[in-house]
Amino acid sequence: MHAILTMIIQRLGLGLITLIAVSFIMSVAIEFLPGDLAQEVLGQSATPETVAAFRAELGLDRAFHTRYFEWLGNVLTGDLGTSLANQREISELLGTRLYNTLFLASIAAAISVPIAITLGVLAALYRNSLYDRLVNIFTLSTISTPEFFVAYILILWFSVTVRIFPSISDIGPDLGFWEHVYRSMLPALTLTLVVIAHMMRMTRAAIINLLASPYIEMATLKGVPRRDVIIRHALPNALAPIINVVVLNLAYLIVGVVVVEVVFVYPGLGQLLVDSVSKRDMPVVQACCLVFAITYILLNLTADILSILSNPRLLHPR
Amino acid sequence: MTDPRKKTELESLFRNGKIGRRAFMQGVSALGLSTAFASSVISDVQAATPKSGGSARLGLGHGGTTDSLDPATFEDGFMLMMGYALRNHLTEIDENGKLVGELAESWEASDDATEWSFNLRKGVEFHNGKTMDSEDIIASINHHRGEASKSAAKPIVAPIQDIKADGKDRVIFTLEGGNADFPLLMSDYHLAIMPAKDGKADWQSGVGTGGYTLENFEPGVRSSGKKFGNYWKEGKAHFDEVTILSIKDLNAKQSALATGDIHMMDRPDLKTAGLLKRNPQMELEQTTGTRHYTFPMRTDTKPFDDNNVRMALKHGVDRELLVKTILKGYGSVGNDHPIAPSNPYYDKSLEQRSYDPDKAKYYLKQAGLTSLSVDLSAADSAFSGAVDAAVLYKEQASKAGIDINVVREPNDGYWSNVWMKKAWCACYWGGRPTEDWMFSTAYAAGAEWNDTFWKNDRFNKLLLEGRSELDTKKRAEIYAEMQRIVRDEGGVVIPMFASYVWVRDKKVAHGANIASNWDMDGGKPLERWWFA
C-alpha cells in the first residue's frame, strides 16, 4: 500500500507541474491569436478610442508576462479572477457549467458503461456468432457516424416523429433532478452511441486475448461452464485494459462534447470555452483549460490506481 | 377553378370587417373554396386582437458567454431584444416605422437644431419602484459619454456638449452642431434608460422601465423575465413570462421550433426556408430593412484611387443573380449607396445600376487599362455567403476582362485584421434609420468607420447642410444628391440589401404592421406580439 501512496503523491506533484505548463502554453497560444477581447467584443463597431478605453479598463494594455504572472499568483491563492467580458466571477460562471457537464457525463456514463461491458462480455462469450457480428456492426456504425448526425437522427426520431424528448436541453436554474435528467436525455443518448463501441470492442478483445492463456484452458478442461470461465476467470484479469478504456472514454465525455452541446444547446463547459476563445477572454479560457487538464490528470491517475489494485504485479515493473 | 380575384375580394371584405363571419362562410362555400382556407383566415382575424398571457419562448442565433447587461457593450440580437424587453428609451420607432416618444412625451428644437428639450412622461416607474425622472436620463446618456467610454454608441453621443435637467420632467441637450435627427438617434438600442444610482447609471441590476422584469440571465445560454405589473405602456407586453434562448446551431433552432420548444426564431436557414414555409403551423415573414452587404474598396490605395476602376467594378457584378443565389430571394438589389427604401429620404427616381460588362470595359479603358487584376478578401464573418458571393462576382467580372482573385480569409479576427486593412473586402452594415447617421458613420471624411477612406468635398458639405436642415423638402433634395454622389463616385459596391427573415409559430400573432428597423418587428416581438 505504501508504494501506491508514494506513486499517488509523485503523480500529483507531476500533475501540478503539468498544469502550470498547460496554463503557460494556453496563454501564449491566446496571445498569438489575432485581436484581443476589446476588439472582439466591440466587433465591427470598434473605434481606436473605444478599444483603447476598453483595454485600459481591463488592463490589457500591460505586457504579456505581467498579466500572466499576476494571473498565476491569483490562481495559486485560489482566486480564478473575473471574466474580462462581463466581470462575473469565474468560479461562479464555471460552477454551473461544470456541474452541467459532469451531470451529462455521469448520465451518459451510467447508461453506456454497463451496456458496453455487458455487450463486450457477451460478444466474447458468443464469439463469431450472429449476435457478435450484429453488435459489432451496430456499434461500429454509430462510432463511425459524426456525432452531430447521430444527434440529428435522434432528434428526428424522438422529438419530431415521436414527441418523447425535447429537441433542445433548456437547462434553467431551479430545475429538479429528474427534470434535468429528462432534458439531458437526448444528448446523453448521443454520447452513449458515440462511446459505446470503443469500450465494447476493448472488453471483447481483452477477454478473447486471455482465452488463449493456459489457466483458462485448464479451467475449460476441468469442466467449468464457458460463462463462468469468462466471468470468473477471464474478466478479473482483463480488468486493467478495460478500466483504462472506460476512463479514457469518461474523459472524452467531459472534455470532448462541444459538438453535442451545440446541437442540443446544452449549457456545458465546452460551449463556454469556445465562446471565450472566440472573444479572447483569457481568464475564462485558462480556467476551462485547467478544469479539462485536471480532469485528464485525475482520471488517468484513477485508471492507474485501479489497474494496480486489480493486478498488483504492475507495481513492480521488471 | 375559382376566380382568384373573387377569393381575394371576399377575403379582404372579411378581413376589413365589411362582412361578418357567417356571410364569409357562405361566400366560401358559394365559391367552392376549402374550409382550411376559411379557418386560417378566420383565426387570423381573431388573432388580430391582442390577448394577454402565456409563456413565450424566443430562440435567437446570437448571444455569447461574454454578453453583459451593460448596454454600452450590446452587440447582437440577443442583447438587443433582451434590452428592449427590460428597458425603454427616450424615443422609439413604432410598428409603422414612425418615430414616437417613449419615455419622452414630446420634444422641441431650437431653430438651428442645436438645442433639444425633451419633456418626460410623468409617473413612469422602474422595476425597483423608483419613479423615472431627468436624473436617470442624464446618468444613462452620460454612461456612453466621456473619455473612458467604451460604448458602441459613443459616436452618437459625441456631439452632445451638455445635458442638463430643467426640473424633474424635462431634459435639455446642447449639441456642438445642429442635428435634425437627434430625437431619432435617441432611439438607438444602446441608449437604454437605466435608474441612476449615486449619479451613475445602474446597469448591473438589469432594472429598467420596460415591460418585463429580469428573472434570470445566464450569458450565452438564456434569459428570462416576468411581466412587469406596473408597466406604463397601454396594450403592450402581453406575455406573462418570456424566455430568450441562444441557439446558435441552425438545425437545433429549427427543430426546436418544429417541436414547439420555442415559439419564435430569427434568421432561418434561407436554403431550407421553403421547407419551413410548407409547415402549416409556421409563418415565415420578412421585412426589408436597412441591412446591406457591401464590398468596400480603399480609395486611398491603388488601383481603387481611380474612380474609373471603381465604376468598372460596380458594373461588373450581376446584382439580381446575387440576390437570387446568396439571399435565396430574401432581399433586394442595391444601388451602390447605403440608403434603403425604408429610410425616410430614399430617392426612388435614382436609376438602378445593372450588370453591364461593356460599360465595365469602357470604364477600364477610361482608366487607361485593358485588363485589371485585383484581390478580393472575403470570409463568412462578413456576411453569410460572402465567399460564395465573391466567387460569383469573379465569374461575372471576368466577362469584362477583370480578374478578381478571391482571397479566403479566416472568420476569426476578420474585423480586426481584414476589414479596413485589405484594399478590397466583403463587409456588411446593419444600416441606420437615418441618412445622416448612415452617411456620417461610414462615408464622411475622417469618420472612424469610413471603410472606403473616401473623401468627397461636395458630399461632406452637403452632409453638414442636411444635418441641421429642419425643412423636409430641402432635406430630401440634399439627400438625393448625396445618394447619387455615393453611387457614382463612392468607393463601395453595394450589390444587395438583405431582408430580415424570421419564423413564428402561428400560435403567436402580431398587429397588421411590422416595423422594419430590426429583426422581428423592430426587435420588439416580446413587447408587441401575443398568443392568439
Image (tube, coloured by chain):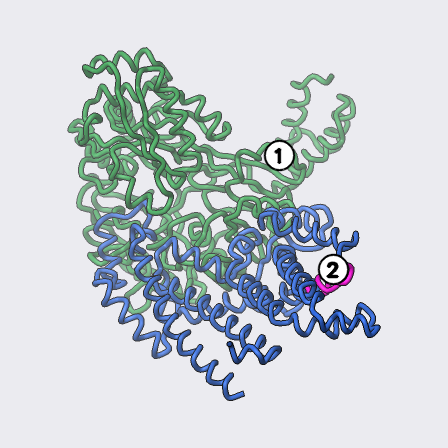
Q: Colour of chain B?
A: green
Which segment did they paint magenta?
A117-126
Name the residue carrying label 1: B275
Label 1: how many Cα within 10 Å (few below 14, some 14–19, many 20+): few
Q: Secondary structure at mark 1?
A: helix
- Give the image location of residue B249, x and y in percent: 52, 47
User: Where does label 2 land, which residue?
Assistant: A123
Tell me residue B16's x, y (percent). Answer: 62, 31
Q: Residue at x 46, y 33 (%)?
A: B499
Could you tell me which residue is drawn at 41 percent across and 53 percent down?
Answer: B88
- The answer to whether one can see residue B349 in this image is no
Q: Residue A144 placed where, x, y %?
A: 61, 48
Q: Is residue B353 left or right of residue B322?
A: left
**x, y (%) of residue A35?**
29, 51
Q: Tell me which chain appears blue.
A: A
Mark 2: amino acid: Ala
Q: Quadrant of the N terminus of chain B?
A: top right
- Quarter of the figure with residue B133: bottom left
